[in-house]
Image (cartoon, rainbow, N blue to C red):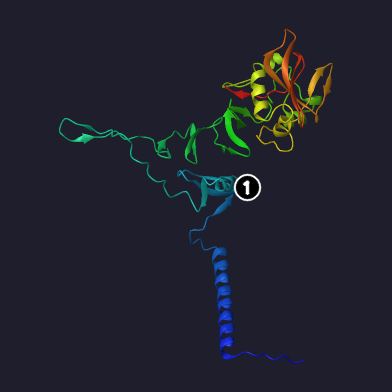
């Protein structure tokens, strides 16, 4: 069987031009691939290496000019947040800080002037900081946590240093809450079913007297009124459960159904309800607490010797 190709000269010229263009594009693509995969060390492409644990590391330069060698995954978090970029090295010095707003030059006795210069060599958005206790992230200066830098950005909130430990906090209305239950191993506290795995997931359970004093400095056990403020902001007792614990978790409170300890080695309700202490006393033997499931929230009173979860509120 034969096929006849009927092309006039004009059509043939156009098709020939397209074929030549495609061929040229393929050649350029192959040349680019070979140049990127070469090992001659040339060019300004970002480089990476591996540390002793085998984790790939890269040079990560923040928008402020600060540059460090991070793991690739950590640097990509910063890149995706728009506060850093991967570079080939940290050799290039950061841009000089802007001049101070007010002049520090003072006239000297011989008619000349002398100026007091800032001795700090590290700047963040034009402000000096002490790298031994602080670090620059984006355009903000943060205090190191237990001597270590960290990434303040977190899913659904922000990461902050509280009592030399990193916690994720969520701002809900006018309140700032810890996004997880406390897991501090205080005397008398328990893991649900005495299983440490439950502490890792739900936090620990505490009696009321311990709960009143366990929140770190700058934070406190919320009162009954403060719990009520949260419930009302989340739509009231009949709706707040779905927004604070349930399917939507709209406010990133991330409540978990951690159950409680009744005494006599009896644990109850894990996977169904979460229970949290308030700082408000009902009587000498009982105090108010919050109970929440995937839909509803209510405030009841519980025996002070029961063990419930603790969620801290910022002062």
On screen, residue 124 versus residue 100, left or right, reads right
Q: Is residue 278 above or below residue 33?
A: above
**Can you see residue 221?**
no
Residue designated by label 1 = 55
The percent coordinates of residue 123 (x first, y second) are: 42, 39
Q: Is residue 90 above or below residue 8?
A: above
Q: Residue 125, located in which quarter of the rendered image?
A: top left
Q: Residue 219, located in which quarter of the rendered image?
A: top right
Q: Is residue 135 above or below residue 310?
A: below
Q: Quadrant of the C terminus?
A: top right
In the current view of this chain or complex, which residue is farthest to the top? 284
The percent coordinates of residue 116 (x first, y second) are: 29, 33
Q: Nearer the viewer, residue 302 or 212?
A: 302
Q: Residue 118, located in which quarter of the rendered image?
A: top left
The percent coordinates of residue 168 (x first, y second) are: 62, 33
**Can you see residue 53?**
yes
On screen, residue 172 versus residue 194, left or right, reads left
Q: Quadrant of the N terminus?
A: bottom right
Residue at the (56%, 73%) spot, across then down: 25
In this rendering, the count of numbered labels is 1
On screen, residue 60 versus residue 252, left or right, reads left
Q: Nearer the viewer, residue 161 or 88?
A: 161
Residue at the (59%, 90%) spot, across then down: 8
Residue at the (72%, 14%) spot, across then down: 287
In the current view of this chain or complex, which residue is farthest to the left? 110
Disc 1 secondary structure class: loop
């Amino acid at each position: 069987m034969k096929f006849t190709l009927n092309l006039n000269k004009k059509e043939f010229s156009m098709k020939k031009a397209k074929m030549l263009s495609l061929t040229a594009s393929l050649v350029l693509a192959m040349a680019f691939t070979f140049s990127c995969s070469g090992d001659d060390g040339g060019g300004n492409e970002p480089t990476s290496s591996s540390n002793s644990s085998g984790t790939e590391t890269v040079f990560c330069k923040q928008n402020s000019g600060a540059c460090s060698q991070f793991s690739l995954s950590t640097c990509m978090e910063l890149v995706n947040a728009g506060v850093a970029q991967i570079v080939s090295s940290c050799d290039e010095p950061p841009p000089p800080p802007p001049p101070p707003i007010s002049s520090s030059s003072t006239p000297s006795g011989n008619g000349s002037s002398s100026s007091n210069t800032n001795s700090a060599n590290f700047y963040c958005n034009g402000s000096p900081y002490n790298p031994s206790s602080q670090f620059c992230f984006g355009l903000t200066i943060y205090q190191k946590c237990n001597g270590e830098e960290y990434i303040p950005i977190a899913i659904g909130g922000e990461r902050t240093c509280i009592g030399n430990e990193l916690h994720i906090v969520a701002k809900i209305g006018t309140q700032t809450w810890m996004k997880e239950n406390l897991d501090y191993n205080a005397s008398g506290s328990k893991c649900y079913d005495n299983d440490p795995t439950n502490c890792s997931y739900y936090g620990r359970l505490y009696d009321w007297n311990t709960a009143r004093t366990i929140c770190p400095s700058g934070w406190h056990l919320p009162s009954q009124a403060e719990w009520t403020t949260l419930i009302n902001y989340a739509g009231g007792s009949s709706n707040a459960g779905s927004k604070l614990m349930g399917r939507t978790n709209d406010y990133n409170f991330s409540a978990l159904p951690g159950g409680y300890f009744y005494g006599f080695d009896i644990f109850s309700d894990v996977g169904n309800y979460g229970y949290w202490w308030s700082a408000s006393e009902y009587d000498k033997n009982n105090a108010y607490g919050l109970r929440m499931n995937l839909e509803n929230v209510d405030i009841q009173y519980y025996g002070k010797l029961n063990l419930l979860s603790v969620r801290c509120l910022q002062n």
